[in-house]
Image: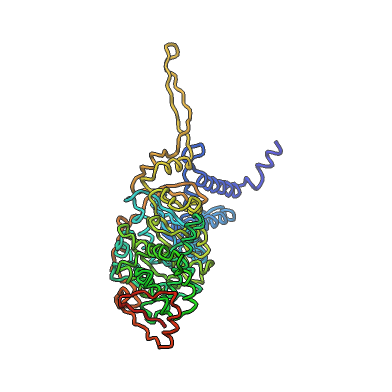
């Protein structure tokens, strides 16, 4: 009894100490309850409110900012109350004026504390966030990824018409217009992208660049004319993509021959006098005229080293025509005049995206395979720019986010390598798919690498059943009551209640999600559901859709496809004609009056 009385009379159980102890226990219970609250039992549960709000809540914006301010203010008031209670026995002993002053001081201190917290911490977390959707916690709260998580990529999967573009790309592109970042949008429904989102960027005074050969605001892009011999390998990667080392030996031999001849022809075309003729469409036009015209061009180029290298292709046992045909298949897009015009002038400076916030819209319509090939070339050129500086910091310029809707339709063989390495360059990917099997257009190990390096996955209505089965298992099982009634003549009705396991979400329920909902998994958290922020239903975003837009064009002159006939015949002195005749191993052929001009 003496020990019990000693504990009862200790400071822990006096009036002030007991009040503080009970308050601390209540705060602890509430915190633990929020953190571990689960739906059902067993292993299956959704992410708790604590997880969602701590990882994905933006505490710099309303209403979480208001909640934070209330919590800080309540904490200051509680500390003041505890101090007054401990020293004076409660507020009843205080003068009313003093009580009002004390509460006011607590409120001002809370506001000052939150302001300092916002300036030092929260304002940085508010920068370039990616909106995932809204979830109801007393009020509809917006959940969003912080900027650093965007560098670890995001994938959106769902059937056509479920909101991949309007629910997860357009709203964020409009939000990025007010942020400090550059964006690259692959527009598969061109010109929908320019008409919908470009106005929001123009309103903020930022540049909008359009690469759509059939759009009047299209900017010229030409990677050949200013390229150096050192950059030739990058040029081959831009046109052909990454060299496939897993192909058969025969395929690799022909691919290597095509690359070598292509680079030699590029070097040949770079020797033209007219800067407007030094472009990839001229490479196509020269090769399309056949081997005799190519031999004539090599004869007149006056570059002995280049003539010597071409000699290996013009021998009696060479496969020059087969190699030439292989190159033409790769660059057949330049047979279309509009596309040839778009690739004829070096207006587009890709460094601009790394220097200031800029929106680049690249047309890639499913209805035009040649435009898609051109889009793939431009994307590869951007990737080469990223590879050129694999480690970037905030002082090196704004981050860049790629929005690749239905990107599987493009031929980008190095996408897996790009997903692996772009994070350190402050580059993030947002990809859209209808089914995971579309990824297996890449090699299996490349598809696995793309999936493994995507931290956040968004699933919409209509996912394939294989994916739905996997997600159901990933969410786990929960316990549900199982009430059973048995009847017998002797005992009558007997009721027994137990618990059985069932999936938290069945594959059928996942496949038939409501059209405005999404199931999201992100690293370090369990899955959770959100309501989509539709660009056509949300009032704030709808105001930004379709604003007047202006495409940025450094050169106002219209784009014109280069013409092979525009070249001048070089005047060869008599003494040089004899030298040219010595290279008779390279037949000049007939060029039907078309002429070539070289330096």
Q: Furthest-top residue in view?
A: 490
| Quarter of the image where the C terminus is located | bottom left
Placement of 386 over or under 94, stated as above or below: below
Does any portion of residue 571 appear in the rendered image?
A: yes
How many numbered marks are there? Answer: 0
Q: Furthest-right residue in view?
A: 2
> Which of 172/318 is in front?
318
> Which of 161/3 is in front?
161
Residue 286: x and y in percent read 36, 72
Does any portion of residue 203 appear in the rendered image?
A: no
What colour scheme governs how the chains and residues are painted in the rendered image of this protein?
rainbow
Taking the image as shown, residue 211 lies to the left or right of residue 316, namely left
Residue 206: x and y in percent read 37, 71
Placement of 88 over or under 205, stated as above or below: above
Task: State the image quarter where residue 211 is shown.
Answer: bottom left
Residue 572: x and y in percent read 39, 86
At a point 53% along the width and 63% down the height, the residue shown is 424
> Which of 449/442 is in front?
442
Residue 316: x and y in percent read 45, 67
| Quarter of the image where the N terminus is located | top right
Placement of 227 over or under 493, stated as above or below: below
> Which of 101/305 is in front?
305
């Amino acid at each position: 009894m003496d020990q019990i009385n000693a504990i009862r009379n200790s400071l822990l159980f006096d009036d002030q100490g007991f009040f503080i102890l009970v308050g601390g226990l209540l705060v602890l219970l509430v915190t633990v309850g929020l953190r571990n609250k689960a739906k059902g039992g067993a292993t299956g549960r959704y992410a708790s409110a604590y997880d969602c709000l701590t990882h994905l809540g933006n505490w710099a914006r309303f209403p979480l900012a208001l909640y934070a301010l209330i919590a800080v203010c309540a904490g200051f008031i509680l500390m003041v109350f505890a101090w007054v209670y401990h020293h004076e026995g409660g507020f009843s002993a205080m003068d009313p004026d003093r009580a009002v002053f004390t509460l006011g001081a607590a409120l001002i201190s809370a506001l000052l504390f939150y302001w300092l917290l916002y300036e030092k911490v929260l304002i940085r977390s508010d920068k370039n966030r990616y909106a995932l959707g809204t979830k109801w916690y007393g009020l509809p709260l917006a959940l969003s990824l912080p900027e650093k998580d965007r560098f670890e990529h995001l994938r959106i999967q769902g059937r056509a018409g479920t909101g991949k573009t309007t629910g997860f790309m357009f709203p964020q592109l409009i939000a990025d217009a007010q942020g400090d970042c550059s964006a690259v949008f692959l527009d598969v429904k061109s010109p929908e992208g320019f008409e919908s989102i470009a106005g929001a960027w123009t309103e903020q005074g930022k540049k909008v660049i359009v690469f759509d050969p059939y759009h009047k605001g299209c900017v010229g892009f030409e990677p050949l004319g200013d390229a150096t011999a050192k950059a030739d390998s990058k040029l081959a990667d831009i046109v052909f993509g990454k060299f496939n080392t897993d192909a058969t030996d025969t395929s690799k031999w022909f691919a290597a021959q095509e690359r070598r001849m292509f680079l030699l022809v590029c070097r040949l075309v770079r020797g033209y006098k007219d800067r407007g003729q030094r472009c990839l469409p001229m490479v196509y036009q020269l090769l399309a005229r056949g081997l005799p015209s190519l031999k004539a061009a090599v004869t007149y180029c006056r570059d002995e080293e280049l003539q010597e290298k071409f000699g290996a292709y013009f021998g009696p046992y060479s496969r020059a025509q087969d190699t030439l045909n292989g190159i033409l298949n790769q660059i057949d897009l330049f047979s279309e005049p509009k596309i040839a015009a778009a690739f004829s002038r070096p207006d587009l400076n890709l460094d601009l995206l790394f220097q200031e916030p800029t929106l680049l819209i690249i047309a890639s319509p499913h209805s035009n395979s040649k435009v898609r090939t051109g889009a793939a070339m431009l994307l590869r050129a951007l990737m080469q720019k990223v590879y050129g500086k694999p480690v970037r910091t905030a002082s090196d310029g704004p981050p860049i986010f790629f929005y690749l809707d239905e990107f599987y339709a493009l031929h980008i063989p190095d996408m897996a390598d790009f997903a692996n390495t772009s994070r350190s360059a402050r580059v993030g990917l947002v990809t859209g798919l209808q089914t995971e099997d579309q990824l297996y257009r890449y090699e299996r190990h490349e598809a696995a690498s793309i999936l493994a390096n995507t931290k956040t996955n968004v699933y919409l209505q209509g996912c394939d059943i294989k994916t739905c089965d996997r997600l159901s298992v990933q969410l786990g099982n929960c316990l549900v009551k199982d009430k059973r009634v048995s009847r017998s003549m002797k005992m009558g009705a007997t009721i027994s209640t137990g618990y059985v396991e069932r999936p938290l979400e069945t594959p059928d329920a996942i496949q038939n999600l409501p059209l405005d909902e999404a199931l999201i998994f992100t690293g370090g958290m369990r899955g959770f559901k959100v309501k989509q922020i539709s660009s056509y239903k949300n009032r704030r975003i709808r105001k930004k859709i379709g604003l007047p837009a202006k495409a940025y064009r450094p050169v106002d002159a219209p784009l014109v496809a280069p013409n092979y006939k525009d070249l001048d015949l070089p005047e060869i002195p008599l003494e040089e004609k004899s030298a040219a005749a010595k290279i008779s191993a390279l037949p000049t052929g007939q060029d039907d009056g078309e002429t070539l001009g070289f330096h």
